Image: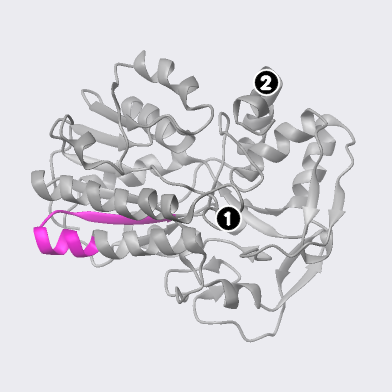
Amino acid sequence: MAGTVVMRRILITGICGFVGSTLAIKLMEAVSGIDIFGLDNFVRPGSEYNRARLKNLGISFYHGDIRCPSDFECLPRVDWVIDAAASSSILAGVDEHTSSLQLVENNLFGTVNLLEYCKKYETGFTLISTSRVYSVEPLSNLPIESGNDAYRLAENQKLPIGVSAEGVDETFSTTPPVSLYGSTKLASEVLALEYGEAFNFPVWINRCGVLAGAGQFGRPDQGIFAFWINSWLQRKPLAYIGFGGNGYQVRDCLHPQDLVPLLLKQMNCIDAKDRIFNLGGGASHAMSLAELSGWCRDRFGNHHVTNNHEIRRFDIPWMIMDVALAKQTWGWMPETTSEEILAEIADHAEQHPEWLELSGVL
C-alpha cells in the first residue's frame, strides 16, 4: 500500500469511555513521542474514573461535547482524529429513557462537527463504527439451529450474500431497518467518506463487533460480557431474553487493545482500495450467553438465570464478524483470546465489587 503520513498528535473523542481510554493507553505504549489529546463530556457513568489515570500518562483533556461546534474552537491542531464517542446502545432513542433527537445529535451531528474540524486542518479521521449497521430483518431470519447451548448456522441451507460460517462480511445488506443507533452510524460512515473525498483527507471506517475487556462499564444493552460476569459474581438478577429464553444467542468478542496495530497501519497509509472493515473476534471468539454462563459457573459457582420470552426490537440470534478483508488488507487478526478477555474481566470484577454501581447499573 502506497503513501504514508507523519502521525504524532492524535485526538480521541470519548476518551474516558472504555474504548477511548484503552486506545489511548495502548497507543502511548506503542509509539514513543506521541501526543494524545482527549475530548469527553463525562456523561457516561464511570467516565470520571478513567480521567485520573489518563491524566497521569500526560494526556491533555478537553471537557467538551462533540455536539457543540464551539467546543472545537479550543482544540489544538492534530494529525489524526479517532472518533470513539457515541451513544452505543442498540435501544438508544427508542426506549423510555433516551431521546431519539439526542441520539442523532450525538452520533450523527457530532460526527459532522468532527469532519468539519478535519476539513479545516486536513486531519485524518477514523470512525469507530459498529456491526449494527447491518440489516436487522435478514439477520433475524438467518437459517439457524441449536446445539451445545448455542445457535449455529443450519447446514445445507441457502445463506444471504455476505454470510458464511466465518460470519457476516462487509458485503452484507445495510438496508433499513438497522435501528436508529445503527442508522446514525451508517449515515456517519457515508458522510465521513464523502468529506474525505471532497476535502482530501484520509478516512477509515472500522465496524467493530462486541468490544469487551476489564474496566468496561457494562450494562444489559451494551458491554454485555462485562455486565454478565460482574452480575454473576455479585449474584445480581440475570435473565435470558427472547428466542425462547434459553440464552443461545451468539456474539463474538474483541478486546479494543487489538485495534491498535491496525489503527497505526491505517494512520500511516493514504492509498487503499477499501475504506470499510469489519473488526471482531470472529468465529474463534464467539459464544452464546448460555456458554458464557457456563464459564461463569465454573469460575464463580452456581447462580440462577431466569427465562424471559419477551421479544425485543432489533434482537438478532447470531452475529459473528467476518474479518477476512482486514486480514487480507492489513494482515490483521485479533490477538487476545476470548478466554483471556473473560479472565481479565473476572479478575477486574473480583478486585472492584463496586463496578456495577460505578457503571450506573445499580
- Please give left or right for residue 102 compared with residue 139 in the image: left
| Mark 1 surroundings: few (<14), some (14-19) or many (≥20) residues within 10 A | many
State the extent of the magenta-drawn residues as a range.
Answer: 193-207
| Mark 2 surroundings: few (<14), some (14-19) or many (≥20) residues within 10 A | few
Percent x, y for residue 82?
A: 30, 42
Percent x, y for residue 274?
A: 28, 66
> Considering only vertical position in the picture, is 241 above or below 298?
below
Q: Quadrant of the N terminus?
A: bottom left
Q: Quadrant of the C terminus?
A: top right
Label 2 and label 1: CA atoms lie apart by 25 Å
Given the image, on which type of amino acid does mark 2 rest?
Answer: Glu
Sequence-wise, the earlier of marks 2 and 1 is 1
Percent x, y for residue 146?
A: 80, 68
Q: For this rendering, which residue is in front, 32 or 70?
A: 70
Q: For this rendering, which residue is in front, 287 or 339?
A: 287
Percent x, y for residue 358?
A: 60, 25
Q: For this rendering, which residue is in front, 328 or 257?
A: 257
Residue 148 visible (yes or no): no
- State the residue position of label 2: 354
- State the residue position of label 1: 91
Given the image, on which type of amino acid does mark 1 rest?
Answer: Leu
